[in-house]
């Protein structure tokens, strides 16, 4: 699944339009959302940017190693601070 597909599904699940997403992220227009999502299917989006988009959609990235019950939340916040 691409970043674009994930974002589109999350936006649809949360009934968030391109205009509302732009507003949540502080962008001036929905065209910026459209361009970023269509730039290589959002696969070149910086991780920090992707995390901020997920945060705007009240979601997070959870990493779980194969064959393990351990989980790690990728939120950009250091556990050492």
Image (cartoon, grey):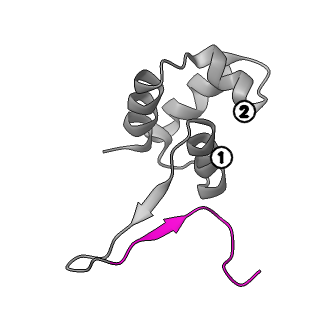
Give the image location of residue 12, x and y in percent: 42, 22
Query: To which quarter of the image does residue 16 belong?
Result: top right
Would you say the residues marked 1 and 2 are in contact, meaning their CB atoms lie under 8 Å apart? yes
Q: Residue furthest bottom?
A: 80
- Residue shown at the point (64%, 15%) measured from the top left: 19
Give SS at disc 2.
helix
Is 65 left or right of 62, judged from the image as shown?
left
Residue 51 within the magenta-colored segment of the rendering: no
Q: Please identify the quadrant where the N terminus is shown.
A: top left
- Residue shown at the point (55%, 16%) measured from the top left: 17
Give the image location of residue 34, x and y in percent: 57, 23
Task: Give the magenta-colored segment's residue range.
Answer: 70-81
Q: Nearer the viewer, residue 57 or 50?
A: 57
Is 54 left or right of 7, judged from the image as shown?
right
- Residue shown at the point (79%, 29%) measured from the top left: 26
Which residue carries the number 2 mark? 25
Residue 71 within the magenta-colored segment of the rendering: yes
- Residue shown at the point (58%, 18%) measured from the top left: 18
Q: Residue furthest left?
A: 67
Residue 1 to residue 29: above or below: below
Which residue carries the number 1 mark? 52
Q: Nearer the viewer, residue 35 or 22?
A: 22
């Amino acid at each position: 699944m691409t970043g674009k597909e994930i974002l589109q599904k999350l936006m649809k699940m949360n009934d968030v339009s391109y205009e509302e997403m732009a507003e949540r992220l502080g962008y001036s227009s929905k065209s910026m959302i459209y361009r970023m999502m269509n730039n290589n299917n959002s696969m070149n989006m910086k991780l920090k940017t992707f995390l901020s988009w997920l945060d705007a959609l009240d979601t997070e990235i959870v990493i779980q190693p194969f064959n393990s019950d351990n989980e790690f939340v990728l939120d950009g916040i250091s556990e050492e601070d």
